[in-house]
Amino acid sequence: MPPELLTPQEMTEADRLAIAAGPHDGHALMRNAGAAVAMEVLRRFPDFARTAVLCGPGNNGGDGYVVARLLREAGIAVRVFAQGKPRDGSDAALAAKECPVAAEPLEAFEPAVDTLVVDALYGAGLARPLDGPAQAAALRCRDAGATVVAIDLPSGVAGASGSTWERSFEAALTVTFFRLKPGHLLEPGRSACGETVVADIGIPASVLDEIAPKTFANVPDLWRKAFPQPAHAQHKYSRGHAAVFSGGPASTGAARLAALAAARVGVGAVTVLAPGNALAANAAHLTSIMLKRLDDDDEGEAFVAAHAPDAFVLGPGYGLERPVRGRVLALLARMERGALVLDADGITAFRDAPERLFDVAKEARAALVLTPHEGEFGRLFPDLAGEDALSKLDSARAAAERAGGVVVLKGPDTVIAAPGGRAAINCNGSPWLATAGSGDVLAGLIAGLAAQRMPAFEAACAAVWLHAEAATRFGPGLIAEDLPSLMPPLLSELL
Ligand SMILES: NC(=O)C1=CN([C@@H]2O[C@H](COP(=O)(O)OP(=O)(O)OC[C@H]3O[C@@H](n4cnc5c(N)ncnc54)[C@H](OP(=O)(O)O)[C@@H]3O)[C@@H](O)[C@H]2O)[C@@H](O)CC1
Ligand SMILES: Nc1ncnc2c1ncn2[C@@H]1O[C@H](COP(=O)(O)OP(=O)(O)O)[C@@H](O)[C@H]1O
Ligand SMILES: [K+]
């Protein structure tokens, strides 16, 4: 899957540039799109008793008329149910004219469990909630248990955000064109799409040079070139040194999960920094990972001065009893390079004064990486979290800009955003990751990669992908402790 994602506006621009460059005109692109959908239908669902194509008034409907014609030509019994009529002279009107199947009104559509429904009502052009007849059609599909193949997007899903208006179609398969849109990867759109296929309809990749997309699917091609490779002559410290702050005696596990993750992702040395009363608990469970006592900020300063770790993790299991903010701000100001990954309690500690953190981050030489789940995000960015008009992508992007750091907004559709507007949506997530401590592992993976000089945005993207890939491959029964040891085979494949 190519990494670029296009907003509906960018897709329209891609369409325009492709037509301008030739040889395909708009009608040819529509025919190619319809042919790609018809091919998937014939390949995957050849045995349905009946097939219904629901056609809207725009180009999505135009694609639908092409599909209906091709299925009829292939000998399939097809009925067409239309909402509205294509505008005279449009490509869709031409496609409707070429379609030998007479259109019936959408209100007459009565699906059954053995109906294959091609949803060509609305795609990228959906501009307002589905009206009554379209919503009723979506509901009838669901109640009947019909199988839906959506063209471009299930009708009712917004391509830019993945949000749905009222009732939307729920597809088993979605066939989209040229590149995915954010709505294919962001929930609830992602779930509504079912499996998603990207079809080549003759738009050349060169149109992307002009469009310069800033949103990406988080696939290895996005960051593979920046992934750290050990060189022959390296020693352990030149492979990077990551340090993880431990919580008190009753909550040391989170830091060790992060530390182990950092180590497993290839960093040369890892140190757990623990308060004196948590040394024994940590010592009992650490072997290759170093342990250092750190009770007050002077000891912290001394440690940084002596060892200059390339990355820190602060937050997992850290607690809110000890002063956190001063330590974080001093560390950020002092670090010469690398990244500070702030997770969990490290984030919550700034709920009353996020600007203090952001001001220091903007001046810092090291990168700040914030890894909030939705709840933690709301503590630092209450206005962004509470704004319904913002998609998860918009929120993460705005937060990264405001924070002056990379924001990893976690969940089933984790978004990674950097100041300047670059953002990636993760797409290999697994619900098996919803287990205590898995976020601690993620923080460690990011720090481990950043400590090896991978730039912070790429490090965060790679860590999110590795984390999810490990969980997806492991599957049922996963606990956070399993995750670090699942890295080696993934690293072998990547390298
Ligand atoms: N771009 C490309 O490269 C390619 C794109 N292709 C295809 O084109 C599709 C995009 O086509 P599109 O722009 O015509 O939009 P589409 O989704 O058909 O809807 C627009 C129509 O719906 C109407 N309308 C909107 N909301 C409504 C509502 N709630 N209830 C009622 N009406 C509503 C709206 O009316 P208006 O708002 O103008 O009054 C307008 O008439 C894309 O998804 C893909 O399938 C391919 O052919 C190949 C190349
Ligand atoms: N349903 C899901 N699908 C995919 N990933 C998920 C899902 N639920 C949670 N995750 C991932 O699991 C991790 C949980 O992190 P977090 O909430 O910080 O947990 P903890 O604090 O217990 O470690 C995040 O990386 C998140 O993206
Ligand atoms: K559709």
Image (tube, rainbow, N blue to C red):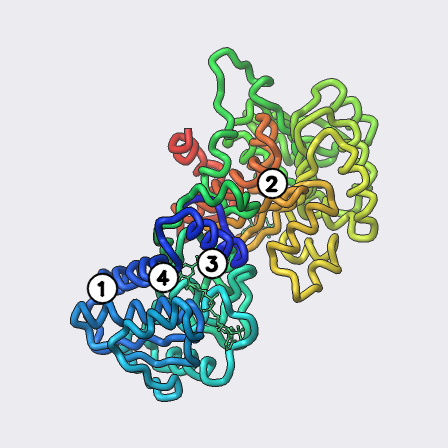
What whole-number distance in Å separates the C-alpha atoms at marks 2 and 4? 49 Å
Tell me if mark 3 has few (under 14), some (14-19) or many (20+) residues whose alpha carbon lies within 10 angstroms of its own. Answer: many
Residue 282, image x and y in percent? Answer: 63, 34
What whole-number distance in Å separates the C-alpha atoms at marks 3 and 1? 23 Å
Q: Which of marks 1 and 4 is in front?
A: 4
215 vs 58, left or right, is: right
> Which disc is residue 27 wearing?
4
Residue extending farthest to the left is 75
87 vs 294, left or right, is: left
Q: What residue type is labelled 4?
A: His
Q: Mark 3 points at which residue?
A: 184
- State if disc 2 and disc 1 touch (CB < 8 Å): no
Tell me if mark 1 has few (under 14), some (14-19) or many (20+) residues whose alpha carbon lies within 10 angstroms of its own. Answer: some
The structure residue drawn at horizontal position 62% and vertical position 24%, both measured from the top left corner, is 241
Residue 378 in sight from this viewpoint: yes
Q: Which of marks 2 and 3 is in front?
A: 3
Name which of mark 4 and mark 3 comes first in the sequence: 4
Tell me if mark 2 has few (under 14), some (14-19) or many (20+) residues whose alpha carbon lies within 10 angstroms of its own. Answer: many
Name which of mark 1 and mark 2 comes first in the sequence: 1
Q: Nearer the viewer, mark 1 or mark 2?
A: 1
- State if disc 4 and disc 1 touch (CB < 8 Å): no
Q: Mark 2 points at which residue?
A: 443
- State if disc 4 and disc 2 touch (CB < 8 Å): no
Q: Does residue 270 sit above or below 375 in this rendering?
A: above
Name which of mark 3 and mark 1 comes first in the sequence: 1
Judge by depth and name the residue closer to the eye, 298 or 33.
33
What whole-number distance in Å separates the C-alpha atoms at marks 4 and 3? 25 Å
Judge by depth and name the residue closer to the eye, 190 or 236.
190
Task: Give the quarter of the image for residue 337.
Answer: top right
What whole-number distance in Å separates the C-alpha atoms at marks 1 and 4? 22 Å
